Amino acid sequence: MKNTMRVKLSYTVDEEDVLKEASKILGLSAEDVQQVVNMFKSIQLNLTGPDELNPQNPPRAMEMIEDLRHALYNVATRLDEIEQIIIGYQEYTLERARTKSEVSTGDEGNLVYPDMDQGI
């Protein structure tokens, strides 16, 4: 696997678009996933040989295994990033729901804030 520097990016979207944006980011990995499947099949062919005219090629299979590891790493990294977005979004929505439930309406329609002197 080559040593490349990974850089963290961030940008802002509306809260209702967070999961849609996560889906778009995940979609960027579709090509990598297809590459993984193709490489997997190619490794198998290099190990078994597709027919008598094309013999087994273990050295090539070994090279391809390293390439496959790199492709799998890219997919796993993207999945980790998506997972962190989902976790952050869930924490945000749970906190927002908790905060909203702490503010309730009293009998006279006045807002009641817990832990605050209500002037009583």
Image: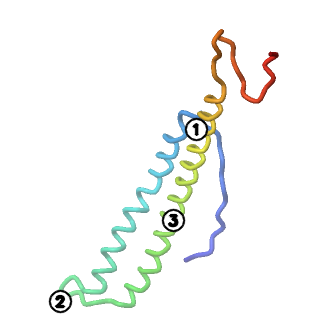
Name the quadrant containing residue 6.
bottom right
> Please, what is the three-letter code of the amino acid marked with disc 3?
Asn
Asked which secondary structure carries label 3, the reply is helix
Distance (Cα) linking label 3 and label 2 = 35 Å
- Horizontal and vertical percent for residue 35? 39, 66
> Please, what is the three-letter code of the amino acid marked with disc 1?
Thr
> Which residue is drawn at the image coordinates 62% and 34% (left, top)?
96
- Horizontal and vertical percent for residue 30? 41, 56
As drawn, the label of residue 93 is 1
Quadrant (top left, top right, bottom left, bottom right) of the N terminus: bottom right
72 on left or right of 95: left
Residue under numbered circle 2: 52
Assess disc 1: are there few (<14), some (14-19) or many (≥20) residues with their C-alpha within 10 Å of its C-alpha.
Answer: few
Asked which secondary structure carries label 2, the reply is loop
Asked if disc 1 and disc 3 are in contact, CB closer than 8 Å, the reply is no
Q: Nearer the viewer, residue 88 or 69?
A: 88
Q: Is residue 77 above or below residue 17?
A: below
14 on left or right of 58: right
> Which residue is drawn at the image coordinates 53% and 36% (left, top)?
17
Quadrant (top left, top right, bottom left, bottom right) of the C terminus: top right
Distance (Cα) linking label 2 and label 1 = 60 Å
> Which residue is drawn at the image coordinates 62% and 74% (left, top)?
3
> Please, what is the three-letter code of the amino acid marked with disc 2?
Glu
Q: Residue furthest left?
A: 52
Sequence-earlier tag: 1 or 3: 3
Residue under numbered circle 3: 74
Name the quadrant containing residue 47.
bottom left
Sequence-earlier tag: 2 or 1: 2
The mark lying in front, picked from 1 and 3, is 1
